[in-house]
Structures are given as structure tokens and as C-alpha cells.
């Protein structure tokens, strides 16, 4: 292993099921159910997944849902907007904690 | 990789046989006014291959002799063959259904401005290539300026009635991915195309067909250059869908190359894999009873037609 993240490891995902396959199977059933078309389309869900992948900064998920978004018919303009949504929420979440900092400072200062 | 023929053996197909013949696909030449990055035939403006008049006459005789229901004209840009209109006029008189695979921008070439009316007058069904509804992506794949020209061509076709309800003039669009990934679900993408093309440009069409990029020709060169070939092939093989096999286009179609040689499909033509030995090899030897139940020549590129929902010149093969 030369890197912490190996591109081909994504294809080994099912090896997680070697131990406690029941939990893995439950997860996969749930995962496939979540990602199937429902009130939201497969395309919309892939864009959400792409945004979340960036928020949690998972290179496997970024790889998988870049491809997934393209295979669902999205384009780079839409994908970039989705990533901006993740960025905006992360940025907003950082800033709103500034109130937390202000509160904490108020509590310990004269 | 499990060879494609072995994959079919596992499904109980000792060999894949043709059945329900319906279409003679005629490749009028590899010359094209575009040079798309994914083209399996590596077509372009400099290609000299063109079907000659004597071969075209042989095609007409075959269509008449065997009362072939559908003739699918392709290329290159089939309209660049000097005898394209000669062929269409004669096929129309025979009453066969005529389909043309149109790259759209051909309608704007000098001397071709009358094509929209010509198609209409002969009730030619059109399959127009449009890989997306955005300019940058289409131009990247098909060449600078192609998107705007394609829109202009579509407007001309709409004006003469193509793609309009109840006109009987069918205008289908053909999507293919702009890279090493599989096409979207056809129905969902059609909805998206219809919304975007209507709202943005006021353009109408009948149906969207999705086609997977075959790992041959220029697209294979891209896959190898970008080191995507193995992963792409792996995706095609792991995506093998048995439900696509009954509808594979090679089973109901025979492909005639520009030089009159016969193939199971346009992809085999690109790879120079003619019909199996012992079968008629040229349009001059065409014998429908023999060809309609022929064994089909297979290769690993056939995984491109069976991955996911499947792929064909008529779009997806398996229900979504």
C-alpha cells in the first residue's frame, strides 16, 4: 500500500461483509432502497450524494457519485452547484459556531 | 475477462442466432463533416470510403427482391454520398420504411440546405445525434460550433413538421455519454432533454434513444490514452444483463458496408469482422433465408450491447 486511499479499494467494498455479513446485507438493502427512485429521482439523489461526499470528504464517494451523477444525466454545472451547496452549508455551519464562541467568551470575560 | 461467447454459453446459447429479421442497415461511407471523439468508425472529412452506384443498385435490388421492411441509412454522414438521394427516392418507391442517422449539421452544409424538405417528402424517419442539451459538452465531443448548428438544423426540421405531434414525421434524438461511463436511464433522460430543449430552445422531438460508447475506434484510443480501458471493460462485463440478449440488434439486422460486404452490425464492420465463413459475404450474394437465421460473429466488444439496460441503434434493450 502506497497511499491511505487506493482507487481500486472501492471495488473491494463487499469485503466489509466478511465479518458480520448480516449487518453488511442489511446495510446494502437499506442503501439500495435509499438510492432507488422514490419521491426523488435517481438523478437528484446522486447529486445529493455528490454534495455529501464532498462534505464528508470521502474520495471513494466523490469518485462513485461523480460517475453516478454523469450516468444519471447530470452535467458539471449542476454537479458544481451541488458541491457549492455542501460548501455553503459547511461554511455557514462554521460561521454559526462563531455565536458559540461569542457566548463562551461572554461567559468567561468581564 | 470471460469471453463474451462463453458468457452466452452459460446462459444456454451455444451460439447466438439471428431471428425476426427486419432491417438492412446500409453504411453509405465513412466520410463525414464531423470527426467525433467517440466515433467507432473513425469517420471524418478526409475519409475516402464511399459506397458506389453499382453497390447502391445492388442494395435496391435486395430490398425489392426480399421485400425488406426497413432500411437504415448510416455513415459517416450518409447524405454526403452523392447517391444518397437517388437511393432514398428508389427505396421510397418500393414502400420500405427509410431511416437515416443524421448528424444534424449536415443540413447546413453548402448544397444540402434542401435536406429537411427532402426527408419530409420521402417520409424518412430521422435519428439525430445530440449527446446533450449544453453547448460546451456537445462541442467538446463533436467539434467547435456543432451545438449551435445542431440547434439550427433541429429548428429547420421542426419547421417542416419533424417531431411535431400527429405529423407522422419522426425525429428521434440519439444520446451517447461524453466519456467513460454508461448512459443514464433512457426514460428519465428523455424527460430531461424534452424539458431543457423545449424550455431553452423551443425544440421538439419524438423520442430520445441512448447509446453506449463502444470500446473500439476513436473511443478505444481515448480509453487507452486516459488509462480507462480496463476499468470501462470491467464495468461492461460486470454489468452484463441477460435480459438484453433476446433483443440484441444483430439478431434482427444485417449491416452492409460501403464496399458491399456484409456484417452482423456496424461495430463488427468497424472491426473488420465480416459474417462467419460459409455465409453470403456480399450484397450481391444476399440470400435472406440463409441470413435470417445465421449464427452471429461475437467478440468481447459485444459486452457493450449487453451492459446495464443494453444498447443498440434503437436505444436501450431491457425494460427499465
Image (cartoon, rainbow, N blue to C red):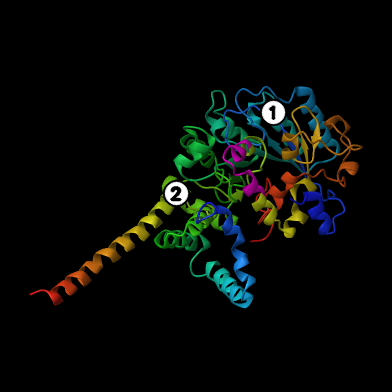
Height in image: A32 above or below B107?
below
Task: Judge from the rendering whether residue B85 lies leftward or rightward of residue B37; answer left or right.
Answer: right
Front-most of residues B25 and A4: A4
Q: What residue appears at the point 83 percent right and 34 percent down from the top-left corner?
A: B62
Q: Are marks 2 and 1 in contact (CB under 8 Å)?
A: no
Apparent side of residue B258 relative to residue B223 in the rendered image (left or right): right
Question: Which span is picked out in magenta?
Answer: B221-233
Discs 2 and 1 carry the same chain letter: no
Q: Which mark is residue B227?
A: none
Location of residue B246 in the rendering, given as x and y in whole percent from the top left corner: 77, 56
Where does the image place residue A19, in percent across and percent down from the top left?
62, 73
Residue pointed to by mark 1? B29
Q: Single out the residue that lies furthest toward the left.
A: A110
Q: Quadrant of the C terminus of chain B?
A: bottom right
User: Circle 2 — which element?
Assistant: helix
Q: Nearer the viewer, residue A12 or B32?
A: A12
Give the residue number, with chain letter if any, for mark 2. A76
State which quadrant residue B58 falls in.
top right
Amino acid at each position: 500500500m502506497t497511499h491511505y486511499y487506493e482507487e481500486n479499494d472501492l471495488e473491494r467494498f463487499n469485503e466489509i461483509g466478511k465479518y458480520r455479513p448480516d449487518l453488511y446485507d442489511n446495510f446494502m438493502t437499506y442503501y439500495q432502497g435509499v438510492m432507488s427512485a422514490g419521491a426523488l429521482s435517481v438523478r437528484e439523489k446522486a447529486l445529493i450524494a455528490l454534495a455529501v461526499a464532498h462534505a464528508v470528504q470521502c474520495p471513494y464517494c466523490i469518485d462513485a457519485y461523480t460517475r453516478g451523477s454523469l450516468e444519471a444525466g447530470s452535467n458539471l454545472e449542476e454537479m458544481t452547484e451541488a458541491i457549492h451547496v455542501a460548501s455553503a452549508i459547511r461554511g455557514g455551519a462554521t460561521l454559526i459556531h462563531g455565536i458559540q464562541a461569542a457566548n463562551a467568551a461572554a461567559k468567561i470575560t468581564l | 475477462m470471460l469471453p463474451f461467447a462463453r458468457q452466452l454459453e452459460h446462459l444456454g446459447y451455444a451460439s447466438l442466432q439471428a431471428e425476426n429479421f427486419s432491417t438492412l442497415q446500409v453504411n453509405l461511407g465513412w466520410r463525414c463533416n464531423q470527426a467525433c471523439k467517440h466515433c467507432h468508425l473513425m469517420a471524418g472529412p478526409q475519409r475516402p470510403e464511399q459506397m458506389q452506384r453499382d453497390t447502391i443498385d445492388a442494395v435496391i435490388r435486395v430490398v425489392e427482391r426480399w421485400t425488406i421492411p426497413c432500411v437504415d441509412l448510416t455513415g459517416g454522414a450518409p447524405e454526403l454520398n452523392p447517391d444518397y438521394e437517388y437511393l432514398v427516392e428508389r427505396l421510397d418507391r418500393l414502400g420500405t420504411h427509410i431511416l437515416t442517422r443524421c448528424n444534424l449539421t449536415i443540413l447546413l452544409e453548402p448544397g444540402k440546405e434542401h435536406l429537411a424538405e427532402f426527408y419530409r417528402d420521402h417520409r424518412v424517419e430521422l435519428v439525430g445525434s445530440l449527446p446533450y442539451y449544453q453547448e460546451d459538452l456537445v462541442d467538446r465531443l463533436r467539434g467547435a460550433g456543432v451545438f449551435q448548428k445542431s440547434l439550427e438544423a433541429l429548428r429547420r426540421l421542426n419547421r417542416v413538421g419533424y417531431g411535431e405531434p400527429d405529423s407522422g414525421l419522426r425525429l428521434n434524438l440519439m444520446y451517447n455519454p461524453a466519456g467513460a461511463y454508461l448512459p443514464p436511464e433512457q426514460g428519465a433522460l428523455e424527460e430531461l432533454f424534452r424539458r431543457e430543449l423545449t424550455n431553452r430552445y423551443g425544440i421538439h422531438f419524438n423520442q430520445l434513444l441512448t447509446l453506449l460508447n463502444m470500446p473500439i475506434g476513436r473511443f478505444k484510443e481515448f480509453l487507452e490514452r486516459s488509462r480507462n480501458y480496463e476499468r470501462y471493460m470491467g464495468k461492461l462485463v460486470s454489468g452484463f444483463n441477460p435480459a438484453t440478449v433476446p433483443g440484441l440488434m444483430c439478431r434482427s439486422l444485417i449491416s452492409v458496408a460501403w464496399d458491399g460486404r456484409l456484417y452482423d452490425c456496424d461495430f463488427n464492420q468497424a472491426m473488420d469482422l465480416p459474417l462467419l465463413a460459409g455465409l453470403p459475404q456480399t450484397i450481391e450474394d444476399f440470400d435472406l433465408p440463409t441470413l435470417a437465421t445465421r449464427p452471429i460473429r461475437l467478440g468481447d466488444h459485444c459486452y457493450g450491447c449487453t451492459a446495464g439496460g443494453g444498447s443498440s441503434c434503437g436505444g436501450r434493450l431491457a425494460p427499465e
